[in-house]
């Protein structure tokens, strides 16, 4: 028992396969004509202009980066330490107030015992 394809179905399949496998003759080679891959002098000029623009941008950026401080923490730390020297922190004030109250209570207890 052999499996065979009827001739009515074989002819259209082979004809369509031959048509689809052919190279296009319309002159459109998918953009790959005889000038494909070649550059023009205009392209070279555009490339040189882009390189010159990049050089100027790098020089400008390096000038601006030289003006930026190394770290931004110095100003904040300097102002915070200056404030800390002039004004005690609230925790220190509470500790000093408790110590003063303790001294007063000790002094009052000493007077009563006399």
Image (tube, rainbow, N blue to C red):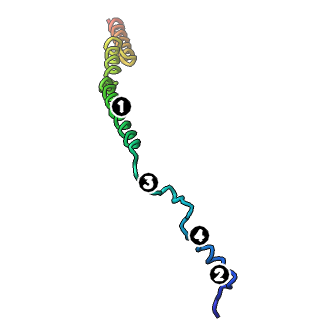
- Mark pair 4, 2: CA separation: 16 Å
First in sequence: mark 1 vs mark 4: 4
Q: Work out whether 23 lies above or below 67.
A: below
Which residue, given by chain and number where applicable, does mark 2 sit on? Answer: 10
Name the disc covering residue 35, or none. 3
Quadrant of res 73: top left
Helix, strand or loop at label 2? It is helix
Quadrant of res 57: top left
Which residue, given by chain and number where applicable, does mark 4 sit on? Answer: 20
Looking at the rendering, in which quadrant would you find the C terminus? top left
Taking the spot 64% from the left edge, 94% from the top edge, the residue there is: 1
First in sequence: mark 3 vs mark 4: 4
Crowding at mark 1 (Cα within 10 Å: few <14, some 14-19, many 20+): few
Which residue, given by chain and number where applicable, does mark 1 sit on? Answer: 57
Q: Work out whether 85 lies above or below 36.
A: above
Taking the spot 40% from the left edge, 43% from the top edge, the residue there is: 43
- Mark pair 2, 3: CA separation: 42 Å
Where is residue 33 shown, x and y percent of the image? 47, 57
First in sequence: mark 2 vs mark 1: 2
Where is residue 62 shown, x and y percent of the image? 31, 29
Where is residue 30 shown, x and y percent of the image? 52, 58
Quadrant of res 86: top left
Q: Which residue lies furthest to the right in this view?
A: 8
Which of 88/81 is in front? 81
First in sequence: mark 3 vs mark 1: 3
First in sequence: mark 2 vs mark 3: 2
Crowding at mark 4 (Cα within 10 Å: few <14, some 14-19, many 20+): few
Residues under numbered marks 3 and 4 in contact, where contact means CB atoms less than 8 Å apart: no
- Mark pair 3, 1: CA separation: 34 Å
Which of 37/89 is in front? 37
């Amino acid at each position: 028992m052999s499996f065979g394809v009827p001739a009515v179905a074989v002819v259209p399949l082979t004809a369509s396969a031959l048509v689809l496998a052919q190279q296009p003759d319309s002159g459109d080679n998918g953009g790959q004509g005889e000038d494909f891959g070649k550059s023009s002098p205009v392209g070279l000029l555009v490339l040189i202009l882009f390189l010159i623009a990049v050089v100027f941008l790098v020089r400008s950026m390096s000038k601006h980066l030289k003006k930026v401080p190394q770290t931004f923490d110095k100003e904040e730390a300097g102002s915070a330490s200056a404030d800390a020297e002039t004004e005690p922190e609230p925790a220190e004030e509470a500790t000093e107030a408790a110590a003063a109250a303790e001294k007063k209570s000790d002094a009052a207890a000493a007077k009563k015992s006399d």
